[in-house]
């Protein structure tokens, strides 16, 4: 994990040794995804058709009075690269409890876009009187003038616009771009706080990510952010807190376990390969369930693939997971065997999986495939290689759980908007647990378990960017190309998830579309579950 409190030092060190990375112009675009109009779990479950939507926020985002100017405790302000004289005006920050109207946001985005086009340099070969061509500096000056009257969401988008251009504008304009970005960041700094409302908390982490990107040192800073990791027990407590107050982990475990139990109901020898075994908790209920079979329990083998984060949290290797599961299996009278594959998921080979003839095989991918680089990162394309390897094993069922967000190959503009909208919904859902805004456990859990993803998505590029989410439609294409076929979900899976959601806020909802089951916050899909064979 990492410590954002040392970001300033890391940023300054990285600036001295960083090299220019690729970035993209901020262009208004449409998401190639689907909006799901969720209904709450208490209402009748239904199947929804997929409909195209823009990449504008699905959640509402109001203009409201800001809290006092609380600077993020983990990040003192960076000193300016270049001096700008801008007077800060009223703090009209954005929260997620109401809304500035979508039309207002679209109008504002159109104004920003018109500013961008107005001051772009002419295309090569065009005949223009250079003496009357305004430069980027004029445009940035206009944005800086508008900034004090923007709400927090608008400020973050405007800042991302400038940062995305800072290393591609003409050299003579780079100082101007960096100065404008820092000026907007100073305004944002007064609007965000890790103990504020959901958008203020998210904004604090997004601000750090934008600063890292502006310094052209996102990957170096991300590595340095691991400076002050929590201890294993502390990290475990952060993970457990998030699991208690949000249903995203339980959704993954509940759905996959229900589908695998159904697929294996008549099998005598069961082998489960879990590509993110973590603490092994998911399989406790599975072992208990099969122990109650009228004709006696089956033989169960579980192969767990480890990851460094889970290993650190549990304070030891996979043998701890195996021992825990073996003790339960013995107490339940279930013949059991455990294999630990202590290797990176990217490096998994056939011999690591210990598959034997005569076993009914189930494979589980919970929130893991998006960490594996694909063809956009390396010609090795470990993502598709692993899927083809799994398909060659002829599993009876394969379960996939992934975040419903498009941050893999999207240009920085769309990636930033996707990240802002996605994590705004997630932070608002965390807020539903009614913990105090200054609750240290919640702050630590968000910092060590969520914020690192935001920093990775926004600040890092290339093989240094670990978080590469894809929408379900893209996963469906990948799996189909690898030879998989979608397995229709039994209605009992949705019923099981709906029952689980009764323990959480009524603003969580489920919907089914295109062979997948989605969980979301209000009308924003956040996670998808699907089964394949």
Image (tube, rainbow, N blue to C red):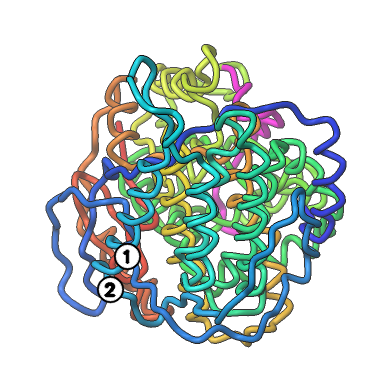
Tell me the residue that label 1 is attached to.
Answer: 105
Q: Which residue is mark 2?
A: 101
**447 left or right of 94 in image:** right
Q: Residue at x 68, y 27 (%)?
A: 20
Can you give x and y, in whole percent of width and height, for residue 26 in the image? Answer: 43, 41
Which quadrant of the structure image shows residue 308?
A: top right
The image position of residue 492, as x and y in percent, is 24, 60
**Residue toward you, 158 or 174:** 174
What segment is highlighted magenta in the picture? 331-349
Q: Secondary structure at mark 1?
A: helix
Whether 79 is drawn above or below 367: the answer is below
Q: Residues within 10 Å of mark 2 (few under 14, many from 20)?
A: few
Q: Is residue 182 left or right of residue 432?
A: right
Q: Residue at x 76, y 36 (%)?
A: 220
Residue occupying image coordinates x 40% and y 39%? 470
Q: Is residue 495 visible?
A: yes
The front one of 279 and 117 is 117
> In x, y percent, where is residue 117?
36, 41
Decide: marks 1, 2 in contact (CB < 8 A)?
Answer: yes
Mark 2 secondary-structure assignment: loop
The residue sitting at 42% across, 52% down in the picture is: 417
């Amino acid at each position: 994990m990492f410590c954002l409190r040392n970001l300033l030092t890391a940023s300054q060190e990285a600036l001295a040794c960083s090299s220019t990375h690729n970035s993209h112009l901020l262009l208004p675009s449409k998401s190639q995804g689907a909006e799901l109009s969720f209904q709450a779990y208490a209402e009748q479950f239904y199947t929804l058709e997929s409909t195209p939507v823009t990449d504008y926020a699905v959640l509402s985002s109001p203009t409201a009075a800001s809290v006092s100017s609380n600077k993020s405790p983990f990040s003192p302000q960076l000193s300016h690269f270049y001096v700008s004289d801008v007077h800060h005006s009223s703090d009209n920050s954005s929260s997620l409890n109401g809304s500035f109207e979508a039309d207002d946001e679209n109008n504002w985005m159109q104004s920003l876009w018109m500013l961008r086009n107005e001051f772009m340099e002419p295309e090569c070969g065009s005949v223009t009187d250079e003496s009357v061509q305004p430069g980027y500096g004029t445009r940035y000056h206009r944005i800086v003038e508008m900034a004090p009257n923007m709400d927090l969401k608008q400020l973050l988008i405007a800042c991302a616009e400038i940062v995305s251009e800072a290393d591609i504008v003409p050299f003579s304009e780079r100082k101007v771009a960096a100065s404008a970005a820092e000026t907007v960041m100073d305004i944002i700094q007064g609007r965000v706080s890790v103990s504020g409302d959901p958008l203020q908390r998210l904004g604090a982490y997004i601000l750090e990510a934008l600063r890292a990107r502006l310094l052209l040192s996102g990957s170096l800073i991300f590595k340095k952010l691991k400076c002050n990791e929590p201890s294993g027990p502390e990290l475990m407590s952060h993970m457990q807190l998030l699991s208690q107050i949000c249903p995203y982990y339980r959704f993954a475990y509940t759905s996959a376990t229900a589908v695998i139990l159904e697929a294996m109901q008549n099998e005598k020898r069961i082998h489960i390969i879990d590509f993110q075994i973590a603490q092994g908790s998911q399989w406790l209920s599975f072992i208990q369930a099969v122990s109650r079979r009228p004709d006696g329990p089956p033989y169960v083998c579980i192969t767990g693939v480890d990851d460094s984060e889970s290993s650190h949290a549990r304070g030891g290797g996979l043998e701890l997971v195996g021992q825990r599961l073996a003790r339960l299996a013995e107490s339940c009278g279930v013949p059991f065997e455990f294999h630990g594959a202590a290797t990176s998921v990217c490096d998994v080979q056939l011999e690591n999986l210990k598959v034997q003839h005569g076993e009914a095989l189930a494979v589980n991918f919970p929130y893991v495939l998006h960490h594996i680089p694909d063809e956009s990162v390396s010609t090795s394309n470990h993502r598709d290689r692993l899927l083809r390897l799994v398909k060659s094993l002829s599993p009876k069922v394969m379960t996939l759980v992934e975040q419903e967000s498009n941050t893999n190959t999207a240009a920085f503009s769309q990636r930033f908007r996707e990240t802002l909208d996605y994590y705004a919904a997630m932070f608002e859902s965390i807020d539903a647990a009614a913990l105090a805004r200054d609750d240290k456990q919640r702050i630590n859990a968000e910092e060590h378990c969520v914020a690192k993803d935001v920093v990775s998505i926004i600040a890092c590029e290339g093989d240094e960017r670990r978080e590469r989410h894809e929408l379900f439609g893209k996963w469906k294409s990948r799996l189909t190309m690898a030879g998989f076929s979608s397995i229709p979900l039994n209605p009992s899976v949705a019923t099981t998830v709906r029952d689980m959601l009764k323990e959480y806020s009524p603003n969580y909802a489920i919907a089914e579309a295109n062979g997948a089951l989605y969980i979301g916050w209000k009308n924003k899909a956040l996670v998808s579950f699907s089964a394949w064979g």
